[in-house]
Image: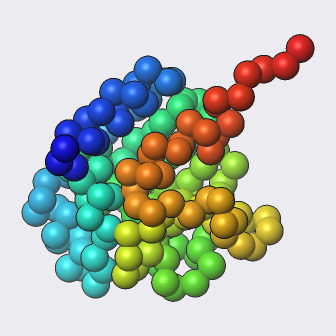
């Protein structure tokens, strides 16, 4: 199954799990221009996502906000909410913890601002793995107790 088909399945699953607000996708030209202007190469699977949704929110009202390259809020490659310059902030959890991608790799992580570290169980192989684990990450798979 190619990446586009995998992404469409993930989007379908996300839409059954909660309320989403996806912005329109960025064009290939917009992504290339962003990378050139900022001297970065975004992760391949994240670029696939940007072609589908250039920003937006998942699991409204208290979930995740993603940043875009063509729609506000824009990705700021110099955002200070990151542990080092090796990372780019591409979104944030409702808690304020930033979602990071590596400048030179595919991995996606959550940076725990309060603790000042990236937790080992919040590092994902790529953006699709992150999306796949998002429901669990947000604790939405846990049943409410009485």
**Which percent across, then down, holds residue 99?**
54, 60
Residue at (52% x, 73% y) in the render: 79
Total numbered labels placed on residues in the image:
0
**Which percent across, then down, holds residue 121?**
65, 59
Colour scheme of this structure image?
A: rainbow
Residue at the limit of the structure toward the left, as seen here? 29
Decide which of 132, 102 is in the foreground and name it: 132
Residue at (73% x, 22% y) in the render: 143
Decide which of 32, 117 is in the foreground and name it: 117
**Which percent across, then down, holds residue 82?**
59, 74
Is residue 73 in sight in this rendering?
no
**Which percent across, then down, holds residue 5?**
20, 39
Q: In the rendered view of the protein, which quadrant contains the C terminus?
A: top right
Among the 4 quarters of the image, the one containing residue 139: top right
Residue at (51% x, 24% y) in the render: 18
Q: Is residue 83 above or below residue 16?
A: below
Residue at the limit of the structure toward the top, as seen here? 146
Decide which of 11, 129 is in the foreground and name it: 129
Residue at the limit of the structure toward the right, as seen here? 146
Is residue 83 in sight in this rendering?
yes
Is 102 displayed left or right of 61 in the figure?
left
Q: In the rendered view of the protein, which quadrant contains the N terminus?
A: top left
Residue at (29% x, 50% y) in the render: 49
Q: Is residue 36 above or below residue 76?
A: below
């Amino acid at each position: 199954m190619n990446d586009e088909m995998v992404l469409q399945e993930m989007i379908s699953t996300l839409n059954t799990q909660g309320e989403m607000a996806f912005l329109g996708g960025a064009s290939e030209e917009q992504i290339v221009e962003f990378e050139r202007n900022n001297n970065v190469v975004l992760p391949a699977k994240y670029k696939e996502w940007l072609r589908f949704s250039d920003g937006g929110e998942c699991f409204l009202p208290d979930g995740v906000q993603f940043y875009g390259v063509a729609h506000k809020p824009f990705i700021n490659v110099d955002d200070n909410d990151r542990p080092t310059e090796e990372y780019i902030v591409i979104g944030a959890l409702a808690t304020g913890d930033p979602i990071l991608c590596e400048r030179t790799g595919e991995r996606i992580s959550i940076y725990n601002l309060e603790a000042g570290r990236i937790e080992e169980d919040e590092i994902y192989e790529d953006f699709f793995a992150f999306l796949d684990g998002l429901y669990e990450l947000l604790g939405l798979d846990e049943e409410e107790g009485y």
